[in-house]
Image (tube, helix red, strand yellow):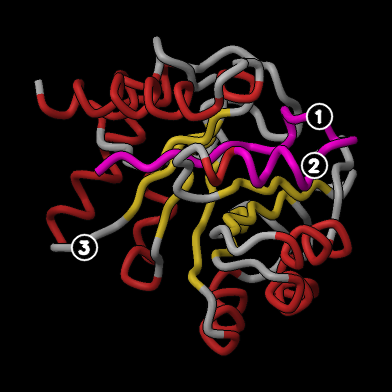
Amino acid sequence: MIQISPSVLACDFSRLGEETALMAAGGADMIHLDVMDGHFVPNISFGMPVIAALRKKSDAFFDVHLMISRPLTYGADFVKAGADRVTFHLEAEDETAAVLDELDRLGVEAGISLKPGTPAEAVFPYLERLKMVLVMTVEPGFGGQSFMADMLPKIRAIREEANRRGLALDIQVDGGIDEKTAPLVAEAGANVLVAGSALFSKPDYKAAVSALRQKAQEAVQA
């Protein structure tokens, strides 16, 4: 089943709580929260206080993507703020197994994200420990980039390896996802789609979420 995770980076930040609530009410499966530290990626977005404030107003599933250099240092703080799933980058400075150990200790779902230049095989040693792998289909750190179709083989390789091991692994894609690219990633094996402007730019959030899900689902069923 295709799941939709709207990225709040594309919303009206002056109405962040309202926008989040409207997306959740419109059928979004989770809310995607991109945390950028200005070091791992050149941009800065928001941190624990914003997520904690949203959590007080929402019971939506918080899909937190840490684009930060030191996820081991801050993981517990994001869980305390309200993260339901914490996805960190394989390319971060902290040792991957240590971050996974900490997330296990905290009792939160764990995901690993791969930059476009990182091969699929790099995440294979950790698949049994993960709820999700996030394949970036743009370079992390900026919204509005064009979808990188050369990431499709990476998605397919991870899905094939997960299937070979009998793992019910979520594969998420983030970057340039809209009604044209959603079928491509779904056919390749992704089942969790992050979308920003493709959803928040539409006047009817419920219709936008439904249309994106339907486009992707049709590709899976074809």
- The residue positioned 59% from the left and 48% from the top of the image is 31
The residue that mark 3 highlights is: 167
Q: Which residue is mark 1?
A: 12
Q: Is residue 157 left or right of residue 90?
A: left
- On residue 16, which mark appears? 2
Structural distance between the alpha carbons of marks 2 and 3: 35 Å
Q: Residues within 10 Å of mark 2 (few under 14, many from 20)?
A: some
> In the rendering, at what x and y percent does residue 60 appear?
57, 58
Residue 146 image position (x, y, % from top left):
59, 12
Are circles 2 and 3 on residues that touch, CB within 8 Å?
no
Closer to the camera in the image, 81 or 138: 81
Which of the 4 image quarters holds residue 209?
A: top left
Query: Is 118 placed left or right of 182 in the picture?
Result: right
Closer to the eye: label 2 or 3? 2
Q: Can residue 7 be found in the magenta stretch? A: yes
Q: Residue 62, labelled with which disc?
A: none
Write down the region rendered in magenta. Answer: 1-22
Q: Position of residue 13 (x, y in %)?
A: 85, 35
Q: Residue 90 colored magenta?
A: no
Residue appearing at x 61%, y 46% in the figure: 32
